[in-house]
Image (cartoon, rainbow, N blue to C red):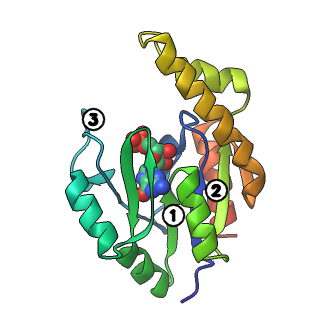
């Protein structure tokens, strides 16, 4: 199976990966988007099968045991994984496939599919990312401090990626990603 049409979009929390993906879902029909499985609680506005398939930990662990995941990782206390079969089917059909996952998952894809393209969405500046992660300032200082520490670790992974896109405007970041996927 050829895996060079597989692109992984990763980057630190808060950088806007899911906004870029939402934009592409609306504007770029050539791309097939993997729907991840997660144990985290549904947020307001989310629907089953939209941004995620929502399962409990037992169901997720049964899927791990069955080899159902291409990659999976624990992130901020929840499990997230990419179902293997649909990705393999769409690659076999020659589709452009996009995964939006965190960095541990991106590393697993790198090991498994060395031809996959790993794209890092980077914040325009550290100050901008910090502002986004602090949010409305309603969370306790230890929660914020943990988020900022995690973001520093995530930013250090940039050098492992094949390409870096600066997250300035959503449309421009999306345009650059499409240019990488379908030159
Ligand atoms: P959120 O809970 O905010 O939707 O996502 C948290 C993090 O999990 C984000 O960085 C997102 O990219 C990542 N993520 C979403 N789905 C997957 C997946 O299937 N695998 C991995 N490794 N990370 C994922």
How crowded pointer 1 is (Cα within 10 Å; few <14, some 14-19, many 20+) is rated as many
How crowded pointer 3 is (Cα within 10 Å; few <14, some 14-19, many 20+) is rated as few
Q: Position of residue 114 (x, y in %)?
A: 66, 76
The mark lying in front, picked from 2 and 1, is 1
Quarter that holds the C terminus: bottom right
How crowded pointer 2 is (Cα within 10 Å; few <14, some 14-19, many 20+) is rated as many
Report the residue at 56% width, 19% height from top.
Answer: 145
Q: Are marks 3 and 1 in contact (CB under 8 Å)?
A: no
Q: Position of residue 11 (x, y in %)?
A: 61, 45
User: For the image shown, how many numbered marks are present on the structure?
Assistant: 3
Kindly identify which residue carries mark 3.
Answer: 43
- At numbered mark 2, what does the secondary structure look like: helix, strand or loop? helix
Closer to us: 171 or 108: 108
- At numbered mark 1, what does the secondary structure look like: helix, strand or loop? strand
Report the residue at 66% width, 62% height from top.
Answer: 118
Q: Are marks 2 and 3 in contact (CB under 8 Å)?
A: no
Residue 106 appears left or right of 143: right
Mark toward the start of the polypeptide (2 vs 3): 3
Closer to us: 170 or 27: 170
Q: CA distance from mark 2 to mark 3?
A: 27 Å
Report the residue at 49% width, 81% height from top.
Answer: 91
Q: Are marks 2 and 1 in contact (CB under 8 Å)?
A: yes
Q: CA distance from mark 3 to mark 1?
A: 23 Å
Q: Position of residue 151 (x, y in %)?
A: 62, 33
Residue 22 visible here: no
Residue 126 appears left or right of 13: right
Kindly identify which residue carries mark 1.
Answer: 98
Beta carbon of the mark 3 residue lies under 8 A of ligand 1: yes
């Amino acid at each position: 199976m050829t895996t060079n049409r597989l692109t992984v979009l990763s980057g630190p929390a808060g950088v806007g990966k899911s906004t870029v993906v939402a934009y592409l879902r609306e504007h770029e029909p050539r791309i097939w988007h993997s729907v991840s499985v997660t144990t985290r609680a549904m947020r307001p506005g989310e629907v089953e099968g939209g941004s995620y398939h929502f399962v409990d930990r037992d169901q997720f662990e049964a899927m791990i045991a069955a080899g159902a995941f291409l990659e999976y990782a624990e992130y901020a206390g929840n499990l997230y994984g990419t179902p293997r079969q649909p990705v393999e089917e769409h690659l076999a059909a020659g589709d452009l496939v996009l995964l939006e996952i965190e960095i541990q998952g991106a590393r697993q894809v790198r090991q498994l599919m060395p031809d996959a393209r790993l794209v890092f969405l980077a914040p325009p500046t550290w100050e901008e990312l910090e502002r986004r992660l602090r949010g409305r300032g309603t969370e306790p200082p230890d929660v914020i401090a943990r988020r900022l520490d995690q973001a520093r670790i995530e930013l250090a992974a940039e050098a492992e990626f094949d390409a870096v896109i600066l997250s300035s405007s959503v449309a421009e970041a999306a345009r650059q990603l499409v240019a990488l996927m379908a030159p």
